[in-house]
Amino acid sequence: MPKITRIIAREILDSRAVPTVEVSVLTDSGVFGTASVPSGASTGKAEDVELRDNDPARFNGKGVLKAVGNVNTVLGPALLGHDVSDQEGIDQLMLNLDGTPNESRLGSNAILAVSIASLKAAASAANVPLFSYINTRYHPHTPPKIPGPVFNLINGGKHGAGNLDFQEFHVIPSTKMSYHDALRAGTETWTNLKTELIRRNAVHSVGDEGGFAPNLFTNADALEILALVIKNSSYRLGQELFLGLDVAADEFFVSNKYPIKDSPRPLSREELIALYVDLVKTYGLLSLEDPLAQEDWEGWQQLVAALPDTTMIVGDDLVSTNAKRLQKAIDQKSCTAVIVKPNQTGTITETIELMKVAEANHINTIVSHRSGETNDTFIADFAVGMSSSYAKFGAPDRGERVAKYNRLLEIEQYLAQES
Ligand code: PGA
Ligand code: ZN
């Protein structure tokens, strides 16, 4: 297998005009891999730490020259001559060099970019598509599978215009649909939603993840308008298309209460759970992500018990792509599905470890982008190779989201030709 001859990092921009890290891993056989990493806005407390320069003179302190420097002067030299296909060895060596529990010394942004670029270089060296390489090496017992897309069509919380508390309002096609039909259904719904917002004279500009950021009165209004748009289309709500939420509840949790527009006074945990029970009854929600504060394990447990098992209770901030936290959530019955974001944990090896825990416990996985993204399509290949149940790449607009949805179209065609 080819050996690493050089690792080069650079500072590039993400979709929010914020710097991020891109890395190229070069090998002695001439093949190479290039990867860039995303960045979240509603980050979990247990996530690994992305290193920022905090130099107010550059990019308002958001520069990543320190992380880039750590790749060029620490990680790169240490990995010279390393077998590029030894992913576990590469990742472990980087974790050892960092030496902290949360990658805060060298930066999870530096470490993950090297981890993914190495994997891409190894796939190129093996002369197979990336998803296929991932599948053969890390998920050989199940063939590659296109995940069900989760479209984020309305953006609130930290990704929107500030008037919706809940962060994401999802439209999720039935997994019985082919991927290209599912993509069409999500896209047509996005377009129909835009038409309806224009008809109502509502704001129809988009938020960070490409969903609309309308000026609605309550969070329930956003679900209502989505339900209406679907009912007025050729798709059947509850059969072909489902609704879901990423509440990102930590972002508005204050003084042990949840102040939201749907209520004149802040809600207690129990009152919010009662609201979710109502919303599930009315809209048959297929998934409910981060519905409660991330350290309220007991509240999550109560919610799982209160809702039918047709609604996935999805741990994002709760788990932070951490295998130990997922095991705790499973043991306590606090969630029934999990978000997978490689940059929450910093290496591909740790991400795969988390997915193995999920699979062993029949927990659905949702491979996810971040709100600050690049055009890197790695997570599309990763979701297919690992046979993830779902993938969440935002709305079907904005280049950095579309690149990933389009990559799934390419893989779908490839798989159809093979069979
Ligand atoms: P983030 O949001 O990337 O801003 O953290 C995405 C999510 O919460 O799923
Ligand atoms: Zn989330």
Image: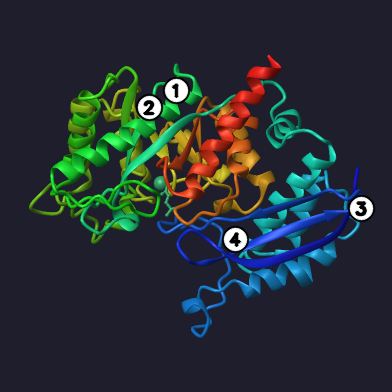
Depth check, front residue: 269 or 13: 13
Quarter of the image for residue 353 reads top right
Q: Say above or below: 145 vs 403.
A: above
Are circles 2 and 1 on residues that touch, CB within 8 Å?
yes
Element at label 2: helix
Q: Residue 181 shows which numbered tag?
A: 1
Q: Residue 102 shows which numbered tag?
A: 4
Element at label 4: loop
Measured as percent of width and height from the top left, residue 3 is found at 90, 51
**Nearer the camera: disc 3 or disc 4:** 3
Which of disc 3 and disc 2 is earlier in sequence?
A: 3
Q: Residue 185 shows which numbered tag?
A: 2
Residue type at mark 4 is Asn
Which of disc 4 and disc 3 is earlier in sequence?
A: 3
**Dot 1, how many residues are within 10 Å of its Cα: few (below 14), some (14-19), or many (20+)?**
few
Residue type at mark 2 is Ala
Residue shown at 91% from the left, 57% from the top = 81
Residue type at mark 1 is Asp
Distance, label 3 to label 4, CA atoms, is 32 Å
Decide if residue 406 is on the left or right side of residue 257. Answer: right
**Dot 4, how many residues are within 10 Å of its Cα: few (below 14), some (14-19), or many (20+)?**
some
Decide if residue 256 is on the left or right side of residue 313. Answer: left
Element at label 3: loop
Are circles 3 and 1 on residues that touch, CB within 8 Å?
no
